[in-house]
Amino acid sequence: MNHVAIITGAAGGMGAAIARRLVKTRTLLLSDVNRDRLNAATAQLIAEGYQAHAVCGDLADPQVSDVLAERCAALGPLATLVNAAGLSPVQADWRTIIAANIVAPQRLLSASQPILQDGAVGIMIASVAGHLGPVDAAVQVLLDDPLQPNLCDLLEPLLVKIIATHGGTMEGQAYSASKRAVIRMCERRALDWGAFGARLVSVSPGVVWTPMGQEEAASGHRAQAMADATPMGRWGTADDIAGTVEFLASDAASYITGCDIRVDGGAVAAMRGANF
């Protein structure tokens, strides 16, 4: 039987490394907003003898998740869903970050749920920022329902209040809040996925030396400061994350669901409670 893995954000960084791991045992359905890089990555895998297909699109567009689910259903049973798409604080304004990091994942999970098969697993890439950022109950309530109308209008004064208390920028606080929401989303929806015999987990990378991570490093001192503060004393690599995803997608992880796996070199352990 032809088991399929959907991988979003598949054209670069962590997504590409994850695709390299999973293509050995699955047919890949790859998605990314960058058409040229997506087509090149897909063509390279096909040239090497693997089964790979591409759907270009921005997951902020509600139709893209539906198209991915329809294409997957035509290819075979959904074995693995990996959402590696997302935006960091240096890449977009805060509203776009909210749309990419929590609205789009919610739509992706909803579109995928009807095609779940027994043994399937969803793996959502979150971030240690979801553990280290300020916790605000009102923000969490809003982001637990990210498809509600006027989400960002309701969220804006709450983020402004957080900044007044804790500092930071709208983009940085939106990023932390959105990644915390992804972690909560996987915990809350794991029960629904369990009804299909499927698992749902999140993975929280620390600072990872990908193009996105390098943009963050170039923007200021915080990313490098986090790498320096970790017990492992180094940046993570895309393959560190890909190896964890490969394990979580395997039968060896068949009792792991509804939780977050930190792959951060010990950053949260070292910095918990710090105003970073």
Image (cartoon, helix red, strand yellow):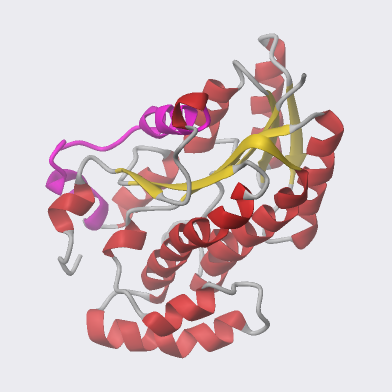
Does the magenta-highlighted stretch encompass residue 235?
A: yes
Residue at 76%, 21% in the rendered image: 2
Q: Is residue 161 left or right of residue 185?
A: left
Location of the N terminus (image quadrant): top right
Residue 154 vs 126, above or below: the answer is below
Residue 46 locus on image (x, y percent): 72, 16
Quadrant occupied by the C terminus: bottom left
Toward which corner of the image does residue 58 lie, by quadrant? bottom right
The chief SS type of the magenta part is helix
Pinpoint residue 274: horizontal percent, then vertical percent: 15, 66
- The answer to if 182 sits in the magenta stretch is no
Residue drawn at point x = 41 percent, y = 27 percent:
243
**92 over 218 or under it: above or below:** below
The residue segment tinted magenta is 222-250
User: Would residue 254 be found to the left or right of residue 213 on screen?
Assistant: right
Q: Quick one: 156 or 262, which is closer to the camera?
A: 262
Residue nearer the viewer, 263 or 3 = 3
Q: Is residue 32 visible?
A: yes
Q: Is residue 250 left or right of residue 32?
A: left
Answer above or below: position of 117 versus 162: above
From where the camera sits, is residue 80 visible? no
Residue located at (16% from left, 44% from top) = 230
For residue 204, side relative to residue 116 (left or right) = left
